[in-house]
Image (cartoon, rainbow, N blue to C red):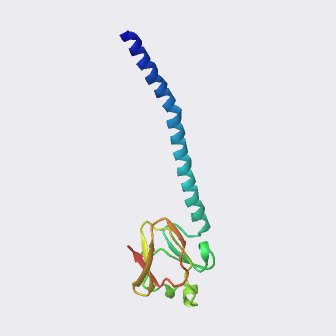
């Protein structure tokens, strides 16, 4: 009788173990697909924003469009010094941070009136109702 019980337990365990294999593989595959999809979305966003590696970029239009100004400096006290659309009084509508650090930005020169920040390797549309007049690492 003990042999029958042991055999039954072993059979059930093997069935459950083998049954979990494909489900676990399917879950791992789904996680890999989700991860790949997320990476593809980041790559797609990065591609729509023309910003050189190591630079912080601001744009006069949504989704990285319009005029672009970019800096490899870690900080800039006055973006109007060398950004044509800021000099013309246009607002910043989108940003991309291709640096290795978070960038915080300000609506006034010399790092006054902080309005936001963007993590390294990301960006997107802003409210679009202000200029970024200075920025520095967080």
The image quadrant where one finds the C terminus is: bottom left
State whether residue 29 appears in this view.
yes
The one nearer the camera, 81 or 44, is 44
Q: In this view, does 112 lie to the left or right of 39?
A: left
Picture residue at 61% right of the left edge, 78% below the top = 61
Q: Farthest residue toward the right?
A: 66
Picture residue at 63% right of the left edge, 78% below the top = 66
Residue 46 is drawn in which quadrant? Answer: bottom right
| Image coords of residue 37 (percent x, y) | 57, 53
Q: Farthest residue toward the bottom?
A: 88
| Image coords of residue 20 (percent x, y) | 49, 32
Q: Is residue 25 left or right of residue 102?
A: right
Picture residue at 45% right of the left edge, 67% below the top = 119
State whether residue 75 appears in this view.
no
Q: Is 132 drawn above or below residue 55 in the view shown?
A: below
The one nearer the camera, 29 or 66, is 29
Q: Farthest residue toward the front?
A: 1
| Image coords of residue 5 (percent x, y) | 39, 14
The one nearer the camera, 133 or 13, is 13
Q: Is 87 drawn above or below residue 125 in the view shown?
A: below
Residue 12 is drawn in which quadrant? Answer: top left
| Count of numbered circles in the view | 0
| Image coords of residue 10 (percent x, y) | 42, 19
Q: Is 69 drawn above or below residue 119 in the view shown?
A: below
């Amino acid at each position: 009788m003990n042999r029958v019980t042991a055999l039954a337990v072993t059979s059930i365990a093997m069935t459950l173990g083998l049954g979990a294999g494909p489900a676990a593989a399917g879950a791992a595959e789904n996680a890999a697909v989700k991860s790949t999809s997320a990476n593809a979305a980041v790559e797609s966003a990065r591609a729509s924003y023309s910003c050189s590696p190591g630079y912080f970029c601001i744009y006069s239009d949504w989704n990285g469009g319009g005029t672009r100004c970019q800096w490899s400096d870690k900080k800039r006290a006055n973006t109007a010094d060398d950004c044509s659309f800021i000099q013309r009084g246009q607002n910043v509508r989108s940003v991309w941070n291709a640096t290795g650090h978070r960038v915080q930005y300000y609506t006034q020169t010399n790092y006054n009136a902080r309005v936001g920040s963007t993590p390294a390797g990301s960006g997107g549309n802003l409210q679009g109702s202000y200029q970024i007049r200075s920025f520095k690492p967080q």
